Amino acid sequence: MIQFGTKSETLERLERLVKCAIVLPQLQFTAYEWRYRQSEILDSLKQLSWSGAPLIVRSSAAWEDGPAASYAGRYDSVLDVFGESEAIQAVNRVLASYQDEDPVHHVFIQPMLPYVAISGVAFGVNPNNGGNYIVINYDDVSGATDAVTSGTTNHLKTYHYFKGSPLPAGRPLNQIVDLMDELEHIFETPRLDIEFAVDKAGQLYLFQVRPLLLNCDLASLDHQSATLKRIYDKVGQGQARQPYLYGHKTVYGVMPDWNPAEIIGIRPRPLALSLYKELVTDSIWAYQRSQYGYKNVRSFPLLIDLGGFPYIDVRVSFNSFLPKELDAELSEKLLNYYMQSLIDNPQNHDKVEFEIIFSCFTFDLDTRLEILYEHGFTKPELKQLSLCLKDLTNHIVCTENGLLQNDLSKINQLEARRSELLDSSIDKVSKIYWLLEDCKRYGTLPFAGLARGGFVAVQMLRSLVSIGILSESDYHRYMSSLETVSTQISMDYAQLDMEEFLAKYGHLRPGTYEICSLRYDEAPDQYFEFSSSREPNRVIEKPSFTLSLAQYKRIQALLIEHGLLDGNVLGLFDFFKTAIEGREYSKFVFTKSLSEAIRLFGQLAEEYGISKEEASFANIEVIKRAYESDCDIQSLLLDSVKAGRQRYEATLQLELPPLITEPSNVWFFSQPELEPNFITMNQVTSKIAFSNEDHESLRGSILFLPSADPGYDWIFSKGIAGLVTMYGGVNSHMAIRAGELSIPAVIGVGENLYNHYGNAKVLAIDCAGKNMRIIQ
């Protein structure tokens, strides 16, 4: 074991010990020595064999990289230094950055490493949660040795390797894994933070080692190994063929269908997870999809709980998008193509219906289908698929079959049933039970149908843009002209007093399924400013949308050509309006029942001495058990809370990728580079802010949100200039809302870019150019 010293001293001690990497030679001296022996130091520099190469002059302050604080990035280092004159300037600059005259400060000089292929930093423990992972942040594009630490690159990648993995890491990052293991034995601690680079010949270099400061406990390696082994086995089972499903394997993702990462987050608390499963992903989703003309996959749960992470079983999802009338042979072939396409293009996991699968007819369908020729599909197969999608879409858009109207009717019934339930004298358990049952039958069930109709509407509208009938501005003008609930919130916020506004919208909460997320009416001052900044008499004018005669005739001709709606253009746009507005309206209505159920659940828990925070660890199944038996409610709640808390605490220290394509991804994975969704064609340059900051900080800022949850609608009353979310798709609530208000937004940037851009002070977004830049 060796002891940490200053940055330069630690490297000097390691130079002859480390076998897995090279430590570059150095010339080290103190501030005192530089002050009184500068000429000797410069003579020594001239005598070194590497003195003709470009140099780096690096900081090594007395308290830098210490056990109490790292002071990372606080002091200057100067790259690409040539000659004596530049060396003197660089050393003086580094010493000046120390901002004191302590003579024990060090400075050291090394040769610059040429021909860099990979550079980055690595941690011996996950610094965020104490999990037993080697976490490597790296750049393999720019060729800069400080690409990660300087924050100047958009090409960041993150690799996680579980230290109890039975499988070795793959090349070339296996070198860093081996180096971390070696350093852990040398320093006798896993709490290490290193900087490294790999040159184009594949040689690994060690630039820095310092103690990793953790604000959390280390996870149990044995416990994590056992948990991940169960997940590994479960994923392995999914690679086998399953009865009643097409496709020879599956993939698990947190975004491909019903977007759990967006709605409940990737580490939801047990109550939120169990509510989402109960109300949407266990059965409701499949029942409604089959009603709209797709394959029947009822009884297959869509969401699989892997270590507390909510994963979509993509094979089940993709089966549910196959037209009901498609024959078995083509269904199998198509399903396997979809799955392989997702595996080959993981960046599309949040936009599978736009980039991978064909789930409805669009006016550019024949062009889109041509890609299948490259994958062995025949002309008769494409014709069969096209006809099935056309029949299915005609079934959805035709107003005579009453699909959308029936769903809207059910939603309206939910309003009346909820009032009756809340006014009744039945006990809280019964009220919660029936609020959730009604929410499924009259809320999420019709919402699932209207959401499907809304997706078809947006796809068809986008296809009118792609074939040149509508322009991009036409599309945005049409979307902005719609009367959605989100638009109404903005209008009502400007015109209603606080009491009236909260009576209408008070049930909303930023985390729709999260009991710890306060409702609007529980903390109005946290979300809104009902004061002098409002303009009660202001009228918000919406843009109008009209088709030209030429556009009308071209769309009519297309409808007649494809046998849709008997050429009824007005009927088509009536469908668009009903579906898109109905989707938002139905979501608004069913969340009232959900919010009331969550509120009553919190009250029930408090009656038994359980706080809302503790209640968030319970499973909603306790309500069903309490309703159908004489079990002791307090015991049910306490047992559920205890089990849920234990599982959730373990979940917090686990790492899993957003897309699991094979069992080995459980042990090690790279975060995939996602393709962000740019909304509107606008630009903005502004400071960034986060939703927990004060109201004034949000005004005129680019707001960062982890998800595109509809409960965050309050942010649009703050005068934000732009929006960035970690999760969310092009068809998510926040994407639609930003489009309506012409707010430049980047939806679903992924964890890496969210954290990268979230460190900026000033950010520029160019939606038309699909570009984000850190200005400051």
Image (cartoon, helix red, strand yellow):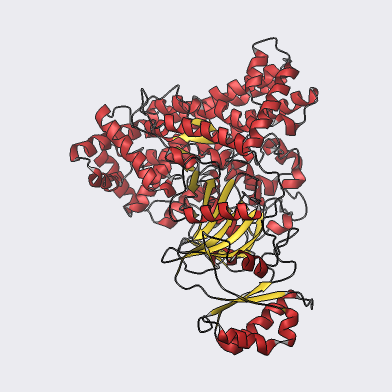
- Report the side of 417 relative to 656 (left or right): right
- Report the side of 726 relative to 240 (left or right): right
The count of marks equals 0
Judging depth in this view, the residue of 241 and 346 nearest the camera is 241
Residue 148, relative to residue 325: is it above or below?
Answer: below
Judging depth in this view, the residue of 384 and 135 nearest the camera is 135
Screen quadrant of the C terminus: bottom right
Asked if residue 746 shows in the view, the reply is no
Q: Residue at x 33, y 27 (%)?
A: 324
Asked if residue 198 shows in the view, the reply is yes
Residue 256, relative to residue 760: is it above or below?
Answer: above
Which residue sits furthest top? 630
- For residue 613, what is the image quadrant? top right
Where's residue 36, x and y in %?
74, 87
Residue 142, relative to residue 68: is it above or below?
Answer: below
Where's residue 675, x and y in %?
45, 53
Q: Residue at x 69, y 34 (%)?
A: 515
- For residue 222, what is the image quadrant? top right
Judging depth in this view, the residue of 3 and 519 nearest the camera is 3
Screen quadrant of the N terminus: bottom right
- Report the side of 384 relative to 730 (left or right): left
Where's residue 321, x and y in %?
38, 33
Where's residue 160, x and y in %?
53, 48
